[in-house]
Amino acid sequence: MTANRREAVFGDAIAALSEAREDVLSRAHGEGLPELSAVITWIERARSLVLMQRDRSALRSEIPALAERLDELVASTGLTDRPDRDAVVEVFISRLPAIRERLAGDVEAALVGDPAAKSYGEIVTSYPSIKALAVYRIAHELYALEVPILPRMMSEYAHDTTGIDIHPGARIGNRLFIDHGTGVVVGETCEIGDDVRIYQGVTLGAKSPRRGDRMRGVKRHPTIEDDVTIYSGVTILGGDTVIGRGSVIGGNVWLVESVPVDSVVIADSPRQLVRSRGDASDPSQLRWDL
């Protein structure tokens, strides 16, 4: 490609991309697009504060800085004219002690529930579920204050780094323990009670509608009552589905209907075929005819 040809191609691309046109991407830009790196920096700062910071002098400088940066992030979502913007930031800051209390319960639940856990410090610094829950509990407060965009950006950052996808709109009680966590999905209108244990690969989701836009604001995800254990690979769908208090849901179960209190739900065991591997005279050759 000659220099003139390349310059022409570049010019055409620039002209097309900068053309003023009304589409969903231009609407998104008009709504406000916070900088992802700034959101990540803020949520990590907030997470560290609620989990670990106790020095009073450090908090005197850290909390005003956190509030100031939050105000800037809220403004970047297009809410510059929101009359209660200052109140949003103040209410969020006032909720930090409650967030810490909830997270302390989550850490305690991990130590009680996981025999592999050796210390609280190990859980706080290395458990992906605690990172995901810390981000969720912070983002949930912003979601409840009707701050747009930011809570989802925060929860998707946690999803990206932990493999645990918790929508900030979900309502989660005290002392949730998510063991391992990879592949766990908790939908927007899901409700989870106290002292619940969830293992990897669990989906608390919605049935797929033909027109999802008609279901906004409708409860679409299940309710999990107190003291429920949900083992790996379980899928529970639907806003009318309630898992009764004290129930145990065995691995790989699919549920779209409610379960009474103190139930045990297990899937039929699949038939296993065990047979000899046959001639092993050539140990370098694996047998593939399964």
Image (cartoon, rainbow, N blue to C red):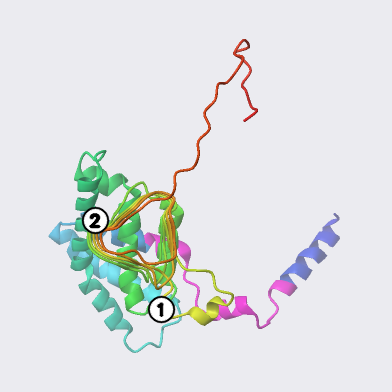
> Of helix, strand and loop, which one carries label 1?
helix
Question: Which of the 4 quarters of the picture holds residue 42?
Answer: bottom left
Magenta range: 16-41
Indicate the position of residue 268 as horizontal and vertical percent values: 44, 48
Q: Hey, what amino acid is under mark 2?
A: Asp
C-alpha separation, residue under disc 2 versus residue under disc 1: 32 Å
> Is 34 included in the stretch rendered in magenta?
yes
Please identify the dominant SS of the magenta region: helix
Q: Which mark is residue 238?
A: none
Residue occupied by mark 1: 75
Residue projecting furthest to the left: 56
Please report whichever mark, 2 or 1, sits nearer to the chain's N-terminal start.
Answer: 1
Residue occupied by mark 2: 106
Image height of 97 relative to 213, above or below? above
Side of 206 relative to 130 (left or right): right
Residue nearest the viewer, comparing 278 with 159: 278
Do we see residue 191 in this rendering? Answer: yes
Residue nearest the viewer, comparing 235 with 57: 235
Image height of 270 relative to 277, above or below? below
Q: Do the residues labelled 2 and 1 touch (CB within 8 Å)?
A: no
